[in-house]
Amino acid sequence: MDIKWLETFLKIYDLDGYTAAAEALNMSQPGVSKQMQKLESELGAPLLRKEEGHLRLTEAGRKVYETSRAIVEQWKNLSKTLGLQAGQLAGKLHIGSSTIPSKHLLPGYLSQFHTLYPNVELAVTVNDSGVIVDHLRHHHLDVGIVGKQPSTPDLLSIEIANDHLVVIGHKRRLEQRSWRDGPFILRESSSGTAEAANMALSELGIDKNMVTCIAHTNDSDLIITMVSADMGFAIISDLEWRSLEKTTPIHVFHTFLAERPFYVVAHRDHMADALPKAFVALCCTP
């Protein structure tokens, strides 16, 4: 469950429309609809219905609306309280991140956190999602941002952002019959991108074990370099692609429609500590 889904639901009903809610939340209308679909799917019941041109709450919607209002209000109060403690918090926060969020999400969070808590020293580790999750489980890190939701119950994980995967290759490959023929340069299996890529290929009926692979690496920059040298195709984050599309001879050959979420993760034992709690609250603040 993502608290942003609850805020979106409240805004849709309060403003009597998806378009108005999208404008108020600075989101696209499809993004608002997607969050609403996820919330209803998670709860297993429709929350809104159309009646005489206006949105009305269903029976389940009325219960969820009141509860959501209370949860969001408590969350805002918590964020405000943590903000008031900005001058008081100090110490060292050990943060881990997988490759893609370390480049495209973490810098913004670090900047905001440092502004709020200038007396906190930040120690950042970057590695594959599986490695970061393992470090969190064994208390080597306080908090992390990864592209693969951990399945272990001792870790708290909250979705904070979404991405898509794309197939990239050198522009010269446009003459090739199909990108499905490869060859591919792939991420190591412990990365969130690799797991998401395998699922995306499977949805297209492509067996990952039958894909021609010429190299595996956990270095996303090396993958970009190898694709730029026309060594093969790769499946990367759309966030990564958008940061380099104007500076390389690379072309997008396919865009996977399925969303790939990113999560802020912390050991539940650490959530009683002020620093991890403050960082998680910041990542979850709209």
Image (cartoon, rainbow, N blue to C red):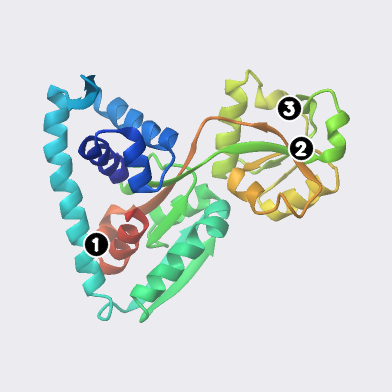
Q: Residue at x 54, y 43 (%)?
A: 192
**Where is mark 3, residue-wise?**
211
Give the residue type at disc 1.
Ser
SS for callout 2 = loop
Question: Farthest front residue?
Answer: 52
**Where is mark 1, residue-wise?**
79
Alpha carbon distance from label 1 to label 3: 47 Å
Alpha carbon distance from label 1 to label 2: 43 Å
Give the residue type at disc 2.
Phe
Which badge, 3 or 2, is on the more N-terminal residue?
Answer: 3
SS for callout 1 = helix
Whether residue 199 is situated above or below residue 235 in the rendered picture: above
Whether residue 248 is situated above or below residue 60 in the rendered picture: below
Alpha carbon distance from label 3 to label 2: 11 Å
**Where is mark 2, residue-wise?**
233
Side of 48 where 4 appears, left or right: right
